[in-house]
Amino acid sequence: MIMEYYVALKLKDSWGDRSCDHPHLEKEYYTGAYLTNYVCIQCGKEFTIAQKLEMNEVRKKNASKLLK
């Protein structure tokens, strides 16, 4: 799945200031090309590649703590 830039903007506007745990990020797409950003498919917030990688690491650490 990909998130088109304008769809992400509409989603972000409709989501407003509500909190979101950003359950799934998708690559952002604009006029026939992928951008370097990722977008939360729930709230429309954009993330850089570095932010996405950091979020993935935190989630892995939290998941491994739950398994112990």
Image: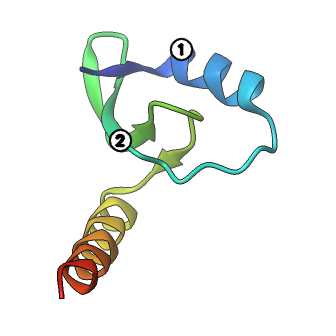
- Name the quarter where the N terminus is drawn: top left
The tag on residue 17 is none
Residue 40 on image: x %, y %? 46, 39
Residue 25 on image: x %, y %? 35, 41
Q: Is residue 42 above or below residue 66?
A: above
Circle 2 SS class: strand
Amino acid type indicated by mark 1: Val
Q: Which residue is mark 1?
A: 7
Q: CA distance from mark 2 to mark 1?
A: 14 Å
In depth, the one of 48 and 19 nearer the eye is 19
Q: Residue at x 41, y 46 (%)?
A: 23
Residue 7 on image: x %, y %? 53, 14
Q: Quadrant of residue 63?
A: bottom left
Apparent side of residue 3 relative to residue 42 in the rendered image (left or right)? left
Report the label total.
Answer: 2
Q: Is residue 66 above or below residue 45?
A: below
Circle 1 SS class: helix
In depth, the one of 6 and 22 nearer the eye is 22
Q: Is residue 31 above or below residue 12?
A: above
Amino acid type indicated by mark 2: Leu
Q: Residue at x 18, y 88 (%)?
A: 68
Residue 65 on image: x %, y %? 26, 86
Q: Is residue 43 above or below residue 53?
A: above
Q: Quadrant of residue 61?
A: bottom left
Q: Which residue is mark 2?
A: 25
- Type of colouring: rainbow
